[in-house]
Amino acid sequence: RIISPEDGIEVELRFASIFSHAFLYLPWADGQMPDFSCFEPMSHKANGHHLPNLGGLHVLQPTQTLSGTIELCVKPVPISSRNENFQ
């Protein structure tokens, strides 16, 4: 779950078990909180290509596929739960 009180929303994430890892990209610059982020569910560890066991990376042969589902549910954060001084 990702909560953004300053925007008044929360995002609940649900994803298939194939996505056993995730990467969160936050492009901080000059100590400033970014105004966006990128959440990436992954089936393997970051940089798995360079790990001895490939970090769980599934190597597919031509015509093979790998699939999974990702569900994002955006909800408003109740006003009573918001902290106007959230940094």
Image (tube, grey):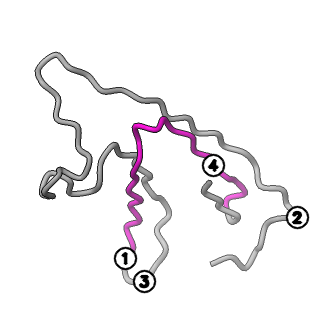
Q: Is residue 47 magenta?
A: no
x 88%, y 64%: residue: 80
Label 3: which secondary element: loop
Q: Tell me if mark 1 has few (under 14), some (14-19) or many (20+) residues whose alpha carbon lies within 10 angstroms of its own.
A: few
Q: Tell me if mark 4 has few (under 14), some (14-19) or many (20+) residues whose alpha carbon lies within 10 angstroms of its own.
A: some
11 relative to 47, above or below: above
Q: Can you identify the residue that label 2 sits on?
A: 80
Instruction: State the residue lying farthest toward the right.
Output: 80
The CA span between labels 3 and 4 is 24 Å
Contact between labelled residues 1 and 3, with CB atoms less than 8 Å apart: yes
- Mark found first going from the N terminus, 2 or 4: 4
Comparing marks 2 and 3, which lies closer to the viewer? 2
The CA span between labels 4 and 1 is 24 Å
Residue type, mark 4 in image: Val
- Mark found first going from the N terminus, 3 or 4: 4
Comparing marks 4 and 1, which lies closer to the viewer? 4
Q: Is residue 14 magenta?
A: yes
x 50%, y 63%: residue: 35
Q: Can you identify the residue that label 1 sits on?
A: 29
Q: Can you identify the residue that label 4 sits on?
A: 11
Q: Tell me if mark 2 has few (under 14), some (14-19) or many (20+) residues whose alpha carbon lies within 10 angstroms of its own.
A: few
- Classify residue 27 as left or right of residue 86: left
Q: Tell me if mark 3 has few (under 14), some (14-19) or many (20+) residues whose alpha carbon lies within 10 angstroms of its own.
A: few
Instruction: State the residue lying farthest toward the bottom.
Output: 31
- Mark found first going from the N terminus, 4 or 1: 4
x 29%, y 54%: residue: 45
The CA span between labels 2 and 3 is 29 Å
x 37%, y 83%: residue: 30
Residue type, mark 1 in image: Ala
Q: Where is residue 46? Give x, y as percent.
A: 27, 56
User: Start and end of the magenta stretch?
Assistant: 7-29
Q: State the image quarter where residue 61 is shown.
A: top left
